[in-house]
Amino acid sequence: MAALYSRSGDLWVATEGEGLLKLSHDSDHWEKQKGKGLPGTVNFLSLVEDRQGRIWAGTDNQGVAVWNGESWMQYNQENALLGERVPALAVSPLNGDVAIATSGGLTIYSAETEEWKDFTRANGLPEDQIVSLSFNEQGGLWAAFLTNGIGYASPASRYSDWKMVQTKFYWDKEQRLRQPVEARGKGLPSNFSNAVCSSGGSVWVGTMSGLGYGRSLSDWKFLRGMDYEKKNEGLWLDKGAHSKNRKANSLSHSLLLPEDYITCFYPVPGGMWAGFRESGVCFIQEPSLMVREVDLREKVEGEGFMYVTCFVGLPEGDLYAGTYGHGLVKVAKVALRPSSSLAGEISAVHPRPPVLPVIQQIKESGNKAGILSGKEKFEACYWYEDWATQGDWCERYGRSYAMLCAMNSAMGDVENDFEQGYVCIPWKGPHVKPGDTRMKYSVIWSNEPKMRNILYCPESTTRTLAQWDDDGENYPRYFDGPDLGAFVEVPEGRHQLSLYFHDPRPMVERAYRDSLRDYIIEIRKFPADFHGNAAMGKLSLEEARLPKDYLMEEVRKITGFPALARSRVKSFAGGGVYKNFILNGKGYYYIRIVRNYSTSVTLNGIFLSSLDETKAALECHRNTRSTSFWYGSKTPAPPAWDRKELKSLPRDVLASWGDSQNMEEQEEPDIFSSRRRGIYAYRHLLSLPGLENLKSNWRWRLKIWNSGDKNLFLKQMDDAWKSLQDMYPIYRSGEWAQYAPEKTIPFSVAEVKKMHAKKIDWKQYLPDSPVKPERTVEEMKKWLKENGDERN
């Protein structure tokens, strides 16, 4: 996922699945990094060496770890960062500032002042998700955003004044073209960025639709890949006005990039090396943008595609490409660009966590004046992403409604509407083959209790990897569809919509093509005249007197409306992510997940929670839900705490925490700053002795996890299962709950019902029972057959 050659002559590699590796300058074998202070994840995403010679390693869901030459130290949401995932790092050649892109926003650490400064949508960023960072020679910072183009901030403003470079999300009024149809043109080709690199006065941007190249904030041009013509042919366009432009401005393949999807850059004198999602690498000359492709596929065995994730140059001029599935592959001998000086003695001192008083941080964490002013009404907005909760969703998500997609396949989903008024129906995207509207339901692995990224199922006490699938593999890769969608109905009020994505197969099964998944998520709301009852199955199309193709026509119509909220999910094979949105008001919403020319679209779970109860965050804890078929009488809940504990907290901290949790009334500006305010308040709480229940309660609400929280989750699930067994005899049967053998008894459903009717102590047959059964299993089965009442 990332590689680095350090000043000390060591080669570092960040991997997905194998942790962090180092090849020391005085060794001939790779050493897997471990030890106190290093997060216990096997997935590392980013690497950088700072001016002091310290190695920074970004993780998938546990912040960043720093090696000072002697030991590791972890920096996360509890002491320094706003998000748990760190996909990008960069060091300023001007002053040694370290920029840290997290799942919750940008943090910049100043080695000169030991200051940590946070940036989010609340103070200038267009979104909190950054995928790539690059400093220029003058210390200016360029950031590439998941869905909002790129931005620039200067060190003179302390990176607080962001200038954006963006383009259109759609290139036609029907909102069907997410990219230009031309091979070359002016501006950026897409707002969906993957990589940014500033070098020699130029800025290079890799997007999902080609290269953006500029020398100022206003002068940009783009170049597409060889696959752009096939992508034009696969566009969802009506015959007529647009079709004649599909091959506009065609260029020969020798003048095009190997493909549209650029993943990474490496600057050298005379131009730039670029990596791609499937086509390996190429060299792009500057300023002509002439392309020279290098075929890496002949150097490796296996599948005929080459997913390049990073580059690393060695002192002798050997340039290597980091790849997904093929390790490090030599690219060429290159003339290295003179590196910016990182002068300074190698330090054995770790960066000091933020020392700014938390109270002051809280006061300054409101919205930047003029950036998000006013109380604009909204119908939907993107909120945040969560890589820490993984499959342990129970009651943290889906408090009103939960859909575990295809978990009960081939019979269907595992679904529970805890509250009335919520419905969810799957539907394919609008660009499908005639008659191909049926969703594919798949169970990949039935029982993987140790893989916490897989959603937990309370009905079976196991983790089953199941998913909805748009069957995209049966369409050409360049076809713009079929995509996956869902109708969602919500009642009055505000609601949190959470979509869960996870697919471990690229690592576990070496199914590397699955690692190419990259989806765009858009939320739209149906107009008032939409026949929702028919769409949700409450009324047939015939009863509503609607045409047979009504639903698909309505989907095609609504995709022409502006998206109310937008996000993107990529690189999730190593972990699971919840993409969270807020739906504001009663109605029918359409979720569209676009395949984006990757493999098929898959979705593991949809969760809905009413936000009306979040204002009760300062209460000891909410009352547990009444008895349910999922949790029995032991619904998971955050730890209770004593109201007296609040007396030790300053009023500003309490007010900030309350504001961070009350999503019922806040508009977008306050919503964008809510998580930052909550994290600051939580850090102040951590500085106080004791109050462990209160700290655990706040972690629950912020989706921050430690080992104790994970153990508590398992205990709560075990308690819930036991209460279900006490209430419903079928849960005692190993026949019914076949994946819970250590928690059931070896009797059929009919037999446990008979035992219940006869008031026989069934617990004596549990594997860990301290009581010896009065009859063996075989004897009890025989006795039940002879004495049991068949009607029970």
Image: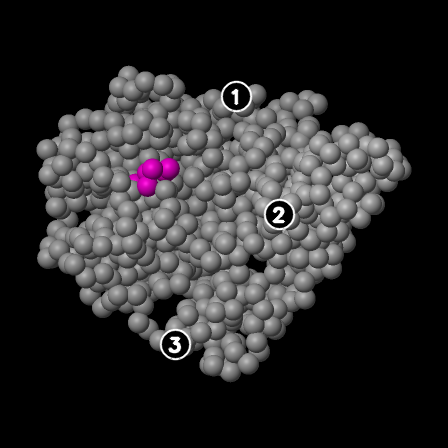
Instruction: Check disc 1 and report the residue beneath it.
Output: 476
Q: Position of residue 213 (x, y in %)?
A: 31, 39
Mark 2 to mark 3: distance in Å? 56 Å
Is 15 one of the magenta-colored residues? Answer: yes
Q: Between residues 70 and 370, which one lies in front from this camera angle?
A: 70
Residue 564 horizontal side relative to residue 425, left or right: left
Q: Where is residue 281 in the image (x, y as percent from the top left)?
A: 29, 28
Choose mark 2 or mark 1, whichever is in front.
Answer: 2
Q: Pick the quarter of the image with the N terminus.
A: top left
Mark 1 to mark 3: distance in Å? 55 Å
Q: How crowded is mark 2: few (under 14 residues within 10 Å), some or many (20 or more)?
A: few
Q: Which label's residue is closer to the chain start, 2 or 1? A: 1
Q: How crowded is mark 1: few (under 14 residues within 10 Å), some or many (20 or more)?
A: some
Instruction: Check disc 2 and report the residue beneath it.
Output: 769
Q: Which residue is drawn at 36% across and 38% down?
A: 16
Q: Which label's residue is closer to the chain start, 2 or 3? A: 3
Residue 275 horizontal side relative to residue 349, left or right: right
Q: Residue at x 62, y 47 (%)?
A: 769
Q: Where is residue 414 in the image (x, y as percent from the top left)?
A: 68, 40
Q: Between residues 638 and 172, which one lies in front from this camera angle?
A: 638
Is there any visible trace of residue 505 in the rendered image?
Answer: yes
